[in-house]
Amino acid sequence: MIILVLNSGSSSVKYILFEMDGEQCLAWGLVERIGDRGSILKHNRHDGHTTKLAGDIVDHTKAIEYILAILLSPNHGVLTDRSEINAVGHRVVHGGERFTDSVLIDGEVMNQLHDCIELAPLHNPHNIKGITACRGLLKDVPQVGVFDTAFHQQMPDYAYLYGLPYILYKRYGVRRYGFHGTSHRYVAARAAVMMGKQIEKINLVTCHLGNGCSSAAVKGGISIDTTMGFTPTEGLMMGTRTGDIDPAALLYIMGREEIGIGEANSLINKHSGLQGISGISNDMRELEEATAEGNERAELAVNMFAYRVKKYIGAYAVAMGGLDGIVFTGGIGENSSEVRRRSLEGLEFLGVELDPEANEADDSDERFIDKGGKVRVMVIPTNEELVIARDTLELIR
Ligand code: ADP
């Protein structure tokens, strides 16, 4: 069974082609700068062969045509005929309350996907463009949607509601949805396997720390709370997003700075977080270098970042009534021993004992980084694409 996984963004489409017997990745790559000058396809084949293809890639349909062409190319490809693709799995950011699981896409589902656009106007339209293009280009091939929000759809109402008038939830769907669900689901399942426990019997805090960051309380395999909310802005501090903030502080700033909704949105999503505090960068690697050189604002930014991670570990341990494991994933979670160390410092009272040597080891595989005490600490590289491929396979079967 061969499955193509697509992640369609505003100006890019990422792809991975899997042979599901053995879950082998055959090829992967991305199309960048769609609709712009200099659009390009970067392609990698499993045997190490790579190639770049520049072209006039005006829209998502053209991008996917390029992807199919390179996959079928005698020189660079891995397929001989389009019909070898058994199904396509699409990442979809927002599934609202409608999609609690991955879904086989038909006309009715397309309508419902359009209904979700107003919840994620920056992401869903591009995801839908990718799906529409595939439905046109690969007519008889089943398409599956896998949602970032779905894993969090079992949160209880007292966790997902805001203390706003209830009517606003009913009228506009204003509530906490959570994101990165595919990643939290994947690493939680891996953690249970690593710990040799049934996932139904353990409480995990999963920390996805990348450019966007979120933690989840995964109790018995179910996400009962997560840090991102109505939008990805809530919760942990991120590269350029504030994370939690007093909404009245934002209103105050809007008044004092005389800015409107658009600028306020840009302020909290693009100019805040690590970037806003440090004034240097949103990139953790650069901040770690600056910290080592004694830059105080970089130090403050890294400290604030880790403190939020720690605070939510505590909150979720309480929400779940106990803690068996903590997982770090995402670019920062997988690579920054410094952030992991700071996030776990002082949590010995919970039963968390970091092994400094294991934490600092230069290792890209999934691994334990604790001393084997009450609460296990793990680094698990995330693999959202594989989850999308697996869900797709399950649905077409
Ligand atoms: P995205 O959310 O866009 O997928 P990633 O998961 O790739 O992002 O995470 C990007 C973040 O990971 C950046 O802040 C980057 O600095 C950080 N990162 C990547 N490698 C390292 C490293 N070796 N040490 C510290 N931070 C790292």
Image (cartoon, grey):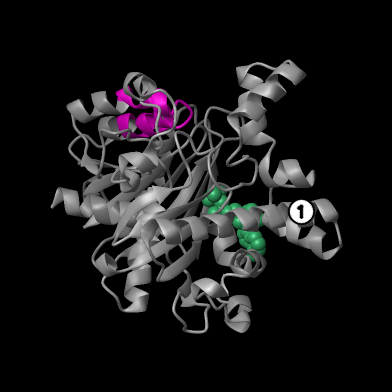
User: Horizontally, is 330 left or right of 93 in the view?
Assistant: right
Answer above or below: position of 202 versus 115: below
Whether residue 183 appears in this view of the structure is yes
- Which of the 4 quarters of the picture holds residue 32? top right
Front residue of 26 and 301: 301
Which residue matches tag 1?
300
Counting every numbered tag in the picture gives 1
Answer above or below: position of 190 versus 54: below
Answer above or below: position of 22 versus 26: below
Q: Which residue corresponds to the image point at 21% horizontal and 46% vertical from the top-left? A: 83
Percent x, y for residue 370?
A: 52, 79
Front residue of 280 and 247: 247
Percent x, y for residue 276?
A: 73, 40
- Main secondary structure along the magenta-highlighted residues: helix
Residue count near mark 1 (Cα–Cα under 10 Å), binned few <14, some 14–19, many ≥20: some
User: Horizontally, is 296 left or right of 311 in the view?
Assistant: right
User: Horizontally, is 120 left or right of 345 in the view?
Assistant: left
Which residue is most to the left? 397
- 273 inside magenta stretch: no
Answer above or below: position of 159 versus 397: above
Quadrant in the picture for the N terminus: bottom left
Percent x, y for residue 23?
A: 30, 65
Q: Which residue corresponds to the image point at 84% horizontal and 55% vertical from the top-left? A: 296
> SS at mark 1?
helix
- 115 inside magenta stretch: yes
Percent x, y for residue 368?
A: 48, 78
The CB of the residue at mark 1 lies under 8 Å from ligand 1 = no
The residue range painted magenta reads: 114-132
**Image quadrant of ligand 1?**
bottom right
- Which of the 4 quarters of the picture holds residue 243? top right
Whether residue 365 appears in this view of the structure is no
- At label 1, the amino acid type is Leu
